[in-house]
Image: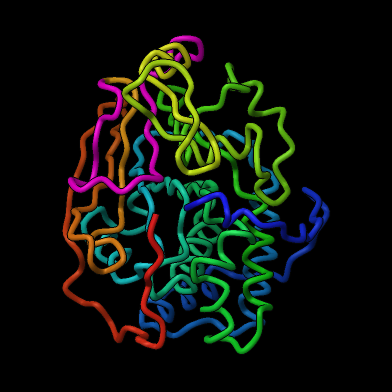
Amino acid sequence: VVRSALTSATNCGATVGVMTSTMLSNSDLDAQIERLKRRENLSQSEVKALCSKAKEILSEEQNMHTVPAPVTVVGDIHGQFYDLLELFNIAGECPSTNFLFLGDYVDRGYYSVECATLVTLLKVRYPKRVGLIRGNHESRQITQVYGFYDECLRKYGSADVWVMFTEVFDYLPLCASVDGKVFCPHAGLSPSLDETDQIQALTRVQEVPHEGPICDLVWSDPDDRGGWGISPRGAGYTFGPDISEQFNHRNGFNFIVRAHQLVMEGYQWGHPAQCVTIFSAPNYCYRCGNEASIMMVDEYLNHHFITYHASPDRGEKDRTRAPDYFL
């Protein structure tokens, strides 16, 4: 996404820890999950209650949210709902499988509303078994350009649901770690952040800034060249193998797993043994022809990758808008 997409937007001004939510029972949530899997969207009032509860849960999590192993790590989804369902067929359903989603739930695909709703439902239903972090598309600025805003208008008749979800996005952790040994940002590293304590000290409940450490965590990319470089995306930085190695060594991480970039084989080691990219939207934008991947981490922190193709079930695509949203 180019820098021109980073136009100013209004911050809804939420504050961590000062909210109340409508009570949602587990049976209510289970029923909503099953309805959504049948492509029956929640009502606007149900989305409001869900988002309120999600903010309450997320406000208790740190900027770097620690998840226990075993866990399945998932990269970009980008509104490809039927491929998300296929992912659960491959990896297993909650709560038998724990998940960590690395952001970019929305935009570009046909079903951003369904994807955002499902991952939020799973987070609220299984808060200790599902981790969500923020991607660069969990932003008011970007979603007004790349599809989610328009989709909310079409499916609900107003922008209210978009407002509810973008408020939730402000509360998402900025990154995660698996048992303190695998570092998991959406995108990459920042020259402003040498240690994870600096991440924990950030104020995250805001729109993604145009620059600075929060921006870098959701925009930066690994590069073959050493050191820091100017990102061709117009936001964040490029960082070399030396930067990944220094960050991992200083903070006790075995390696970095991140998303944010299309890789044709589903996963790719950008920096051997130090930084790997996973991408979980197969046949991205319904035409890129790429495989998708998830990373399985067992209780001993051993990891392996599972690659898969797009779901044979494509649903009834909304052809009133072709998803021509590319890099």
Q: Residue at x 30, y 48 (%)?
A: 262
Q: Residue at x 54, y 81 (%)?
A: 42
Q: Residue at x 66, y 57 (%)?
A: 7
Pick the front one: 48 or 244? 244
Pick the front one: 115 or 244? 244
Q: Residue 295's spot in the image, x, y percent?
A: 28, 40
Vertical comparison of 293 with 199: above or below: below
Q: Is residue 147 left or right of residue 191?
A: left
Pick the front one: 135 or 240? 240
Q: Is residue 309 left or right of residue 103?
A: left
Vertical comparison of 251 with 171: above or below: above
Q: Residue 178's spot in the image, x, y percent?
A: 43, 31
Is residue 258 on the magenta stretch?
A: yes
Vertical comparison of 182 with 173: above or below: above
Quadrant for residue 289, please give it: bottom left
Which region shows up in magenta? 249-272
Q: Residue at x 21, y 77 (%)?
A: 313
Q: Residue 215's spot in the image, x, y percent?
A: 60, 40
